[in-house]
Amino acid sequence: MLADLTLGQRPKGRTALAARWIVAHRDGGHRLLENGEVVFDADRIIHVGARFNGDVARRIDLGEVLISPGLIDLDALSDLDTTMLGVDCGPAWAKGRVWPESYVNRGPYEMYTPEELAFQKRFSFAQLLCNGITSALPIASLFYREWGETVAEFEAAAEAAGDLGLRVWLGPAYRSGGMVCTAPGVLEPRFDQARGMSGLEDAVQFITAQAGRFDGLVQGMLAPDRVETCTQELLARTMAVADDLDVPVRLHMAQGQMERDTVQTLHGTTAPQWMAGFGALTPRLIAPHATYATEDDLHLYADHGVTVAHCPLVFARSGAMLRSFAKLRHMGINIGMGTDIAPPDMVLNMAVGVMMARMAGDSIHDAAPEHMLDAATLGGAKALGRSDLGRLEPGAKADIAIFDMQDALMAPRVDPVRTLILGATGRVTQAVFVDGRLSMRDGQVAGFDMTAARARAQAQFDGLRAKYPDRTWGHPPVDDIFPPAYPHLD
Ligand SMILES: [Zn+2]
C-alpha cells in the first residue's frame, strides 16, 4: 500500500505500481495502457506495460486510478497570488498594480520580510505537488517588491524544493525598469540599466552555486521579468549567458495591450519582432503568454523554436484567450502549460484550455483534453530540453502523478483522460513521486503541516493587502481599492 511508504523518501529496491489506467509513452506519443504496471528503481522507470516479470521489492495495486507522467508547470505560481485581487477590481493603475510616482519618490520597499518570502515559496511548492505538478519554473509578482527577487529567497526556495521533493528551475527575477503611473491612467516606463545588469549577475551566481543540488532536483533558469521592463542590452546579455550556463530563459511577452503599446513606443515594433532583431529568439526561450501575439510574432516563434507557456485560467478570468491553441500547434510552435494564478491547479488549467480553445474556434478534434495533457507533459519537457521528463517509459525519471478516478464527486467515466480533465480539478491527485521519492500523498507533504501553513498564509496575505494603499494612486483606504462583492450590511 502507498500508506506503507515513507513520505519524502525514495523506497528501497524496485517498486511496481499497478493501476487500471496508465498514460504510457511509446513511439513518440502517449498511449493509454489498461490494467498495467509502472516499475521504477531509485530515480528511474524501468518498465511500463503488462505485469512485470522481474523481482520487485513491493507491488502496490492502486486500483481505479490514472497514473500519469508528473505535470510540468512552466509558469508555476510561487507566491500568495495577488493577481486574484485585481480580477474583479480594476483598472490596474488604480489598484496598486502600477507604482504611482509618489510611491517611487518615497522609496519602494519589500512588503514581505525575508521569512515571509521564504515561507510563501515553500507553501506554494507544496501546493504544486498537491496538484500533480512534479516540475516547476516558479513565477511571482514583483509589484510588492523593492525591485527584483533576491538570492536569499531563492536559496530558501532551493532548500524547500530539496526538502519537499519538487523538481525546480530557479533563478531570481530581474529587470532594468518598471512602469510608473504619472497621472490617472498614464503609464511611463523608467529604466535603471545598471540595476538590471546587477540582477542578472546575481542570478548567474545563484545558478552557478545551486544548479544540480539535491540529486539534480534544482536546476537554473534565467528569468528577466517582462519584456517591456528590460533593455536590449540586458536581454542580449541574458541570452548569451544562458548559452554559457545551458539554462532556459523565461520572459513574459506578447501578453497584454499595455506591453504592446509600451514596446511600440520604445522600439517601434512588437516584442517578438524586436527580440528577433537582435537574435534573442531561440529554443531556450519560454514565452508566456502569446495572447497578444500577432500573426508575424507567431511565425517568428515557429521559426526560432520558441516555446509558448500557455496559462488559460489567468486569461479566461479577464476575458482574454490564446488565439488559438490549435493554430499554434499546427504552426509547429511548442506549447507548454503554466498555472500562473491561484489555485495552482494544472488540471483546471487544462480544462479551461480546452474550453477557451473551442471558444476561439478550434474544432473539438484540434483542441482536446489529450492535447492539453501533451502540452503539460511532453511540451514542457521539450522546452526544458529534457527527454527524460513528461513521459512514462523505461529510462525516464520516476516523476509520476496518480489521480483518483473513483473520487465520490467525479463524473461517471467516459475515458480516464477526458474525465479527469473535464472534471477540472487537481484535488483528485492522490499521490506524487518525484525522482522516485514519494513527495505527496493524500494532500500531505514531508515535514510541512499544510493546515497550519494555510492559516499562516492568510495572515501574511492580509498583511500585504493592508499595505496596498502605499502603492496605489491617490492612496485610498484599502476597502476602496478592494470593495466587497456585495455591499456590507451595517
Ligand atoms: Zn505569467
Image: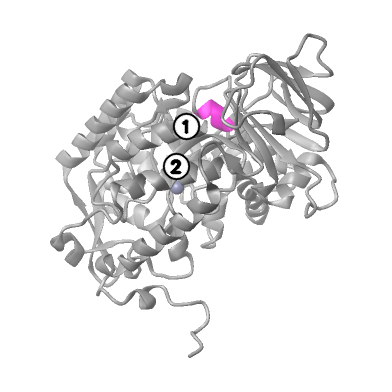
Q: In terms of secondary structure, where does tag 1 sit?
A: helix
Q: Nearer the viewer, residue 204 or 467?
A: 467
Residue found 68% across the figure and 23% down from its top:
392
Magenta stretch, residue numbers? 379-383
Residue 331 location in percent, x, y? 58, 35
Image quadrant where residue 42 sits: top right
Placement of 350 over or under 385, stated as above or below: below
Residue identified by numbered label 2:
122
Q: Which of 319 and 108 is in front in this view?
A: 108
Magenta region, main secondary structure: helix
User: Which amino acid type is marked by label 2?
Assistant: Arg
Residue found 75% across the figure and 19% down from its top:
58
User: Which amino acid type is marked by label 1?
Assistant: Asp
Residue 472, visible in the rendered structure: yes
Residue 366, visible in the rendered structure: no
Residue found 74% across the figure and 47% down from its top:
364
Numbered circle sitting on residue 116: none
Whether the magenta-drawn stretch holds residue 22 is answered as: no
Q: Nearer the viewer, residue 139 or 312?
A: 139
| Distance from the alpha carbon under mark 2 to that under mark 1 | 9 Å
Residue identified by numbered label 1:
163
- For the residue carrying disc 2, how many other residues have a C-alpha within 10 Å: few (<14), some (14-19), or many (20+)? many
The mark tally for this picture is: 2
Residue 217 location in percent, x, y? 48, 25
427 left or right, relative to 233: right
Q: Contact, CB < 8 Å: mark 2 with mark 1?
A: yes
Q: Which of 198 and 293 is in front in this view?
A: 198
Residue 38 location in percent, x, y? 74, 22
Q: What scheme was used to colour the molecule? A: one colour
Placement of 379 over or under 110, stated as above or below: above
Q: In terms of secondary structure, where does tag 2 sit?
A: helix
Residue found 18% across the figure and 41% down from its top:
195
